[in-house]
Image (tube, rainbow, N blue to C red):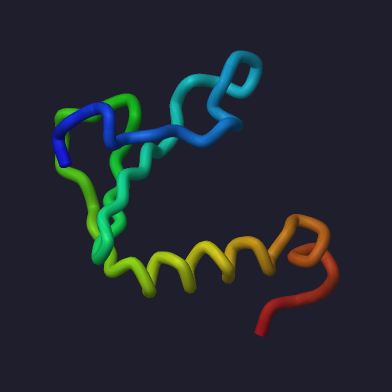
């Protein structure tokens, strides 16, 4: 996964939003994440299913939802 053509950044990482972001690359079984400021450093890898669950959990918690009440 060191080939740069596999890695992509969030569309939010453009001008005005800063160019520092995490980058992601995926395979049929794993998702890889790395720091765009230090692409030569180690990447984290997660099973595809676990990463999909993580992303769905992030989508479920918007800033408006998080301010709605205390966390328990």
61 left or right, relative to 25? right
Looking at this view, name the residue that lies furthest to the front. 28
Q: Nearer the viewer, residue 67 or 38?
A: 38
Q: Nearer the viewer, residue 1 or 13?
A: 1
Looking at this view, name the residue that lies furthest to the top. 15
- The residue drawn where x is 68% and y is 68% is 60
Q: Nearer the viewer, residue 19 or 56?
A: 56
45 left or right, relative to 50? left
User: Where, by quadrant of the figure, is residue 39 drawn?
Assistant: top left
- The residue drawn where x is 51% and y is 36% is 10
**Residue 24 rendering spot, x and y as whole percentages:** 36, 43
Name above or below for residue 24 compared with residue 30: above
- The residue drawn where x is 82% and y is 59% is 64
- Quarter of the picture containing the N terminus is top left
32 left or right, relative to 12? left
- The residue drawn where x is 37% and y is 73% is 50
**Residue 27 rendering spot, x and y as whole percentages:** 26, 55
**Residue 49 rendering spot, x and y as whole percentages:** 38, 73
29 left or right, relative to 59? left
- Quarter of the picture containing the C terminus is bottom right
**Residue 2 rendering spot, x and y as whole percentages:** 14, 35
Looking at this view, name the residue that lies furthest to the bottom. 72
User: Where, by quadrant of the figure, is residue 30 drawn?
Assistant: bottom left
Q: Nearer the viewer, residue 2 or 63?
A: 2
- Numbered-mark total: 0
User: Where, by quadrant of the figure, is residue 58 drawn?
Assistant: bottom right
């Amino acid at each position: 996964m060191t080939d740069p053509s596999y890695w992509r950044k969030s569309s939010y990482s453009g001008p005005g939003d800063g160019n520092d972001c995490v980058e992601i690359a995926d395979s049929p079984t794993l998702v890889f994440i790395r720091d765009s400021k230090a692409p030569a450093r180690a990447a984290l890898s997660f099973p595809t299913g676990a990463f999909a669950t993580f992303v769905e959990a992030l989508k479920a918690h918007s800033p408006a939802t998080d301010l709605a009440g205390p966390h328990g």
